[in-house]
Amino acid sequence: MRHVLTRGGASFAEGARAPARLPRWSVRFLEQPTATAGLALVLTITLGALFASRLVPGDPLVGDGPALQSPSRTHWLGTDELGRDVLAGVLHGARVSLFVGIAVAVISTACGIVVGGLAGLFGGWVDDGMMRFTELVQLLPRFFLAIIIASMFGGSLLNIVLLLGLTFWPSTARLLRAQLLSLREREFVVAARAIGVSAPRLLTRHLLPNALPAIVVNASLQVGGAILVEAGLSFLGLGDKSYVSWGSMLNNAQPFIQLAWWMSVFPGLALLLTVVGVNLVADGVNEATNPRLAGSGRR
Amino acid sequence: MSPHLTRYVLRRLLQAVFLLLGVVVVNFSLIHLAPGDPITLLAGDGGDAAYFAAMRAKYGLDRPIVVQLALYLRGAFQGEFGYSFAYGRPVSDVILARLPPTLLLMGVSLALSTVAGVWLGLVTARRARSALDRSVLVGTLIGYGMPAFWAGQLLVLLFSVRLGWFPVQGMEDARQDYRGLARLVDLLRHLALPVATLSLLHLALITRLTRTGMREELSKDYARTAHAKGLPAGRVATRHALRNAVLPVVTVVGGDVGTLFTGAVLTEIIFAWPGLGRLLYDATLNRDYPLLMGIFLLVGTCVIVANIVTDVVYAWLDPRVRYS
Amino acid sequence: MARRFRFGTRRGGSWRVVYLVVVGVLTSIPVAAAQDGTPTPVAGGTMVVSIASDPGHFNPAITTGFTQHVVADSIFNGLVGLDENLQPVPDLADRWDISEDGTTYTFHLHPGVRWHDGAPFTSADVKFSFEEVLLQYHSRTAAGLTPVLAGIDAPNDLTVVMRFTQPYAPLLQRLDVTEAPIVAKHVYEGTDPTTAEANLEPVGTGPYRFVEYAQGDQVTLERNEDYFKDGLPYLDRVVFRVIPEANSALQALQQGEVDYAWNTTPAQTEILASAEGIATVNAPASPGGALCINTLVFNLEHPPLDRPEVRQAIYHAIDRERMLEQIQFGSGRVATGPISSRMDAFYNPDVATYAYDVDRANALLDGAGLTADADGTRATLVFPHPNTFDRYGEIIREQLGEVGIEVEDVSLDFNAATDRVFVERDFDLGIVSYCNGTDPEIGVRRVYDSRNIRPIPFSNGAAYRNPDVDRLFDEAATTLDPAQRAAAYAEIQAILAEEVPYVWLIETEGLRAFSAEFHDFQHWSGHFAETAWTGAGG
């Protein structure tokens, strides 16, 4: 249900530009306070995830403290009903969430580029076939698939990533196709064609670079979308039990929401900040790479 | 509609039939592939081998899967979608009973988030990169980044448990038998929190899409010229720009129509809303094969139709779009 | 955010106090106090009941489903009821005689009982209900009675005779409204009872009659003015509301939107205890099952679990007190064997016990030659379990890890987990809530009888084979002498506790939470609302 944002999300970034302005690009990105804040959030969470085992050693699934203890000096974010440290869960959970988010975005973008690229480039019956295939995948009941996969293969993290990656790409494909269709009619492409530029060259030199910012923004939005879907699946008990995840922590915390607020507030906050951070970064990239947007602002 | 467009729509509809057939076959296989036995639900904490065998025979589950699929397809072509195992009633009855609550919840929240999102998008497009713009960005993203099940709980704790403004659960008051206006008010009070939870999901996206689109359009030559010439023309330009700017919004809202029916599982669970999402969830856990097939078929049809309608609306809004 | 949370709870509490004081003042007038100080029931009022899932239909005779029974049992009756100690009391049958040899039961029906549509209730309805509905579609009754029932006769309108092929002791324990609800012959005759229209417009004899069903949302029942039990029921209306999330049900209870919750969880015990105006009860039985024991299933076909010492070691390695405290939050008891300690007539406390003792567990494993490899791992066991048992999975994984047994904790949805353990048999450890029922013959035997090793859910999942145990179960089932039965069951319990084909973890109870304005529930029964009344005027 969350992937909706990512589906259309990329339309944010429609626009064409030459690819040779990377330095300006990063400067424009960093000039935006929201984008830098987002980047800082994402970096902080990434560092927390990377050094989780160093910061809070031990198995986060094993309780070593008193149950349901509020935040204290020994357990900064409190403990859950089995005496497990919430801070350890939040930090180790960051690994799961970031892994899921990034892996899903990579898989789905790769699939989406292939399908959308073929459809947008060739048009005609290829386009028709690809788009109907895309629709078929969109029609797959993802939630039910999650149960089947979790039941048959034990709901491992890898399976969840594959499931999401292989069902998230239709948005990317549709987006890229739309971009290519619109670019095909633009003056510079028409002109290039007129002077006899070959199709592969047209694709690699003119079309893809112009569509790339939109794809990048879409991919970063999918990171957030995938994190949320994974949390939703874990919340319904369909996640991977061998790892702590923010979704499963929130699920555990349900009965204690009035009794032990720290059990749900911290994982929820971590999830929220990650998704907001990723989306702020995506927005910043979009603002920085879209020249027509850049022109209409204060500067 | 131009003859061109008519032909296009007809072709899409023809393709849709085959697509649906594909959907049925894929879903049927998936459902029967899934571990678990629907008779487990019926047997509960009991049942011997004889009971299981008798029930399998009664529901035709003892036949080869290909035969079951063929029988299902034959029935479906005649408008017979079978009986739900759990409800003991025709699948179509069971689904129809759950449609109104779902459409109410999803329709209201989609409409609300679209109106609010387009308005916020317009406001922020004019003041891009202002403090207001950035606050709206962060604010709407916070709404999006909160998982529905968590956001719903927080809303309940604040507005129901602490402030007592809205009920915790359900669609109507269980104690009172309201009529007329009082019933509408009661319904709206129950609708408030789940609608808020769901609207938060879409608001960020629609705001951002409108804002980006508007800024692009306003930076185009025609709009600049129109504005330079004075207010009336500027207003026309704004209207024209908005029309172009909402194209991506149409895509998103159109894409949502499919999920309209089942998109709110978590929200429906948290707020005890009697909609289709929860029906699908229950049917999944119960392995209620005919009911699952029925829901998937309904959702599939809606997504396909919505995709066609979206493409047509797109063409209508943007004359440059041509379908071959 | 944190502050708001704490503040929210406190404010919620004080509101509740104000509310209670006001309600208390208003209601102190109608509640008349009897001479001995206990309040006398008053008629009237509405009760809103929260249930976790949608019942879907109201024919309790075709299902053992918890939700269907919680709702529909109030509309119907059984031949006999069950009291608080799960002993038979009159319901549709006023009294009964049992033949000397224990093979013939004669039931004398209450005269003048009418169905909700006005038709008279007769013995023909009873005969029809068993032969055409219960023995076909009520899985537990069908499985239990079909092998032993010789026939049912209706010699006159008010007499029913049930004949058996052997002495059959547990009959009276399995005739209540949950196990054998009586439906109307004139309503169901000639229909398919699983799809009949009447399943949505039920006609019963019970304390409440059906009014309205909004699918997935709520079911409304109203008082049966012509109920055959004088003065009952008290409540005007009972509304069942489907609230899937236990936390939402709790909040609805706190806010006064709900009066009685079937779907609270033990984790809510503490918050419920501190909530004012809410009372709680732990009931050992419900329409979903009586005297249930959360039980760890060993797959005896998978080495090293075929060795008793290994199973005993695992028993010692599991801290069941911790489970009781951290998962069940004190509701229930640590189990000692296959028969619940609440089944007074048959429970045997003098059996081998397995206290939490890591050293002893390690010693047993060493003795069994199950030595640790370089990583300190003695064995790896696959533990697929329903996701409702996730907490058990986590604790077992942690605690068996401490004695060098690595547990691969696989959380599945209930249906898939049941399939994997009982049908696919692809597991080393499983976990099941096995319910004793009201007699060992009903719910205990199926778990240990070697003739019940079948690909059927909730059968003998461990694949435990012991001819002595089979013989003792037969012996206990074919005599009516309580002492003889108790002796046989005592021996069974001693043998099983020695051989440990299963680990009996926790005897669970159902936590019920309800508004303190309401009184006299039969929490253990499908007829929970038959005698309930409210002092709040609804």
Image (cartoon, coloured by chain):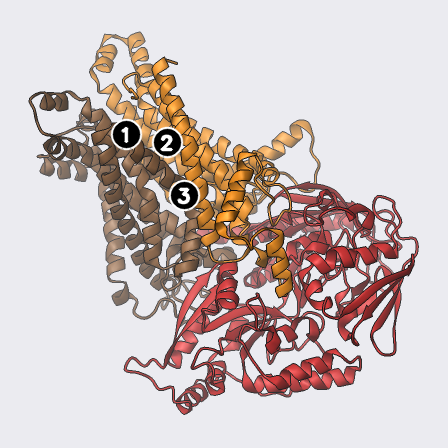
Chain colours: A brown, B orange, C red
Secondary structure found at label 1: helix
Whole-Å distance between the Cαs marked 1 and 2? 25 Å
Give the chain of mark 2.
Answer: B
Q: Chain of mark 1?
A: A
Image spot of residue A146 (x, y percent): 41, 52
Marks 3 and 2 sit apart, C-alpha to C-alpha, by 19 Å
In front: A138, or C463?
Answer: C463
Q: Secondary structure at mark 2?
A: helix
Location of residue B85 in the rendering, given as x and y in whole percent from the top left corner:
60, 49
The residue at the far bottom in this view is C367
Quadrant of image for the N terminus of chain B: top left
Q: How packed is label 1: few (under 14 Cα within 10 Å), some, or many (20 or more)?
A: few
Vertical position of residue C377 compared to residue A256: above or below: below
Q: Nearer the viewer, mark 1 or mark 2?
A: 1
Graded by Cα atoms within 10 Å as few (under 14), some (14 to 19) or many (20 or more), the crowding at tag 3 reads some
Residue linked to disc 1: A125
Q: Does residue C106 show up?
A: yes
Q: Amino acid at mark 2?
A: Val
Furthest residue toward left: A195
- The residue shown at (81%, 50%) is C184
Residue located beneath label 3 in the image: A140
Vertical placement of C343 versus A47: above or below?
below
Q: Are marks 1 and 3 in contact (CB under 8 Å)?
A: no
